[in-house]
Image (spheres, grey):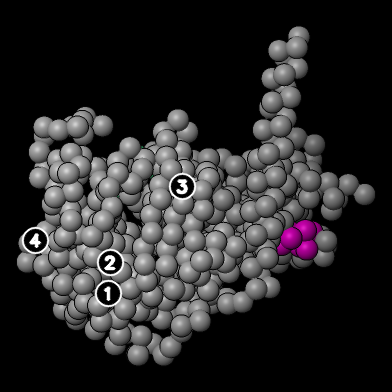
């Protein structure tokens, strides 16, 4: 469903993506792992058109994304940003229901609010946070509000940029289950970025490891442990010794 | 010699590129005027923020300026026995120049800076990206409501500023300089022409447009990080102030040079 071919992106002299090839089939949960600063966030932002790649192609459903009708294209996506990216001028429930309050998915306010409260509940937040402002929440709570916003309009394709970073282990488990559920029950296609190996095992159908601007290894999560790739091995065991330098 | 020429050329190209970018930005903003949906709530919010909450600062600025103007004109006029012109000159000075310019500069300080800081912060915290992924065009959602609100509400602010400025002159004239109240008002009313008032309000609209536009433009261009926000805010206020003064000259030329 999503196919990236030979994607390149540099910021000035900093060549971040240097020929990324990646294929995510429909209804699958792909997890992207890789060291900090290897360009995982840049990768998913390029798919959404928030970052313009220097070269290479991105296809969704066989159609080149640069030629798609932007509005219709984006309506199919949900995205959780690494930093939450909540609108700090709007109360929590209006953040979650943002898409349901305007544009083509607009519906009555009471109904939108109901959906928002329900999505908040699914990410483990009670109804009384609905009327607070994002600045009044903890970092982990903000992250979960961002998650609720990403899934609020039940998109077909969802990107999660580090959904469990900053959450306690129990809440991480809840979020992992939620993402798994969204993929298996709603049939969504998901790309999740994470550093948390527990999450990888809980969420992934397939795993891709980004290193040095390319996909170093990709394959089913079951093959991850005996891939024979020293880079992947070092990453999943979290060892300081190995081919990946600790200073980057 | 060639180096000097090259530097001049590069500077000219840079300036042209900057003007081009700004023109594209203006074009994009205005194009959303005719493309629904419209975000009325954002527009209403901007009207209140830019218009209503600017009233105190506009009122105080105009009041003190009108008062000071009356004192100066009286002092200056008395050197050649022309103190009697205080009402007329205060009126013309406030309405034609000081009202629109000072209100414009106060709006640049108050509104341009807050718009730029807000939008730049949204940019660096990825809120603008988030808007895009939620199928909301940032130009339509953030820029157009602010620019439109400022353009429409500034003539009102300038009108109020003009009146309060004249009142400032009136208070000083009647309380300190011994003018007769009724005569002062009568002189003011008789002297002002329709062109004075129209030009004043038209300047207001143009200055409002510039002030909000600069805030949005530099906010959207902001670099990453807190320094980026600071720089965007500073640059937007300076650009707005300079452009307002330049536009004021051109408008004065257009209205009154005949
Ligand atoms: N807008 C930008 N301008 C300049 N450089 C950028 C920009 N966005 C990302 N970069 C650079 O691209 C590189 C990859 O950034 P990215 O955010 O994709 O990393 P990441 O893999 O998501 O890391 P992390 O796991 O820490 O989130 C970094 O070196 C970063 O400095
Ligand atoms: Mg990242």
A166 horizontally vs B25: left or right: left
Q: Are marks 3 and 2 on the same chain?
A: yes
Counting residues from the N terminus, which is met first, the one under dot 4 or under dot 2? 2
Spatial separation of the CA atoms under disc 3 and disc 2: 21 Å
Q: Main secondary structure of the magenta part?
A: helix
Q: Which residues are magenta?
A: B196-202
Q: Which residue is mark 3?
A: A7
* SS type, badge 1: helix
Mark 4 vs mark 3: in front: 3
Residue nearest the viewer, comparing A79 with B98: A79
* SS type, badge 4: loop
Image position, residue A41 (x, y; %): 34, 51
The reply to whether dot 3 and dot 2 touch (C-beta < 8 Å) is: no
Residue nearest the viewer, comparing A50 with B92: A50
Spatial separation of the CA atoms under disc 2 and disc 1: 7 Å
Image position, residue B185 (x, y; %): 71, 64
Q: Which residue is mark 4?
A: A168
Q: Which residue is mark 1?
A: A183
Q: Is mark 1 within 8 Å of ligand 2?
A: no
Q: Does residue A115 sit above or below B219 in this rendering?
A: below
Q: Are marks 4 and 1 on the same chain?
A: yes
The reply to whether dot 2 and dot 1 touch (C-beta < 8 Å) is: yes
Image position, residue A219 (x, y; %): 26, 56
Spatial separation of the CA atoms under disc 4 and disc 1: 23 Å
Q: Residue at x 40, y 50 (%)?
A: A21
The reply to whether dot 4 and dot 3 touch (C-beta < 8 Å) is: no
Spatial separation of the CA atoms under disc 4 and disc 3: 35 Å
The reply to whether dot 4 and dot 1 touch (C-beta < 8 Å) is: no
Q: Residue at x 79, y 40 (%)?
A: B81
Counting residues from the N terminus, which is met first, the one under dot 1 or under dot 3? 3
Q: Which mark is residue A29?
A: 2
């Amino acid at each position: 469903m999503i196919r990236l071919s030979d994607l390149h992106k540099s910021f000035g002299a900093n060549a971040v993506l240097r020929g990324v090839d990646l294929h995510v089939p429909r209804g699958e949960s792909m997890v992207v792992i890789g060291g900090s600063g290897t360009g995982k966030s840049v990768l998913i932002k390029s798919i959404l058109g928030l970052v313009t790649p220097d070269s290479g192609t991105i296809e969704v459903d066989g159609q080149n994304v640069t030629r798609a009708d932007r509005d219709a294209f984006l309506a199919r996506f949900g995205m959780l940003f690494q930093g939450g990216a909540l609108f700090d001028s709007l109360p929590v429930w209006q953040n979650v229901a943002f898409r349901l309050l305007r544009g083509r998915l607009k519906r009555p306010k009471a109904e939108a609010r109901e959906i928002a409260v329900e999505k908040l509940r699914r990410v483990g937040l009670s109804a009384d946070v609905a009327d607070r402002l994002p600045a009044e929440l903890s970092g982990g709570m903000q992250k979960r509000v961002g998650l609720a916003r990403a899934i609020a309009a039940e998109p077909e394709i969802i990107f999660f940029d580090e959904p469990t970073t900053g959450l306690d282990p129990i809440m991480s488990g809840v979020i992992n289950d939620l993402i798994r559920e969204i993929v298996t029950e709603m049939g969504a296609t998901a790309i999740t970025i994470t550093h948390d190996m527990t999450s990888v095992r809980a969420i992934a159908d397939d795993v891709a490891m980004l290193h040095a601007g390319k996909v170093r290894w990709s394959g089913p999560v079951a093959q991850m442990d005996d891939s024979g790739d020293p880079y992947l091995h070092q990453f999943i065991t979290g060892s300081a010794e190995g081919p990946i330098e600790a200073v980057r | 010699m060639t180096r000097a020429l090259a530097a001049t050329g590069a500077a000219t190209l840079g300036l042209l590129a900057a003007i081009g970018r700004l023109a594209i930005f203006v074009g994009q903003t205005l194009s959303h005027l005719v493309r629904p949906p419209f975000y009325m709530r954002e527009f209403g919010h901007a009207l209140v923020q830019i218009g209503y909450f600017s009233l105190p600062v506009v009122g105080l600025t105009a009041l003190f300026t009108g008062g000071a103007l009356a004192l100066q004109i009286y002092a200056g006029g008395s050197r050649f026995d022309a103190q009697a012109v205080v009402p007329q000159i205060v009126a013309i000075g406030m309405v034609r120049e000081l009202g629109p310019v000072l209100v414009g500069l106060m709006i640049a300080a108050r509104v341009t800076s807050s718009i730029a800081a807000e939008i730049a912060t949204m940019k660096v915290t990825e809120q603008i990206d988030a808007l895009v992924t939620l199928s909301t065009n940032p130009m339509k959602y953030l820029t157009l409501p602010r620019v439109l609100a400022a353009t429409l509400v500034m003539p009102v602010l300038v009108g109020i500023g003009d009146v309060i400025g004249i009142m400032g002159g009136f208070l000083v004239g009647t309380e300190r300089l011994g003018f007769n109240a009724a005569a002062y008002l009568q002189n003011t009313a008789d002297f002002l022409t329709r062109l004075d008032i129209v030009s004043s309000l038209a300047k207001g609209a143009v200055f409002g447009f510039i002030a909000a536009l600069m805030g949005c433009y530099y906010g959207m261009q902001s670099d990453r990080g807190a320094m980026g926000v600071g720089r965007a805010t500073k640059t937007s206020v300076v650009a707005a102030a300079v452009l307002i003064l330049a536009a004021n000259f051109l408008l004065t030329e257009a209205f009154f040079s005949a």
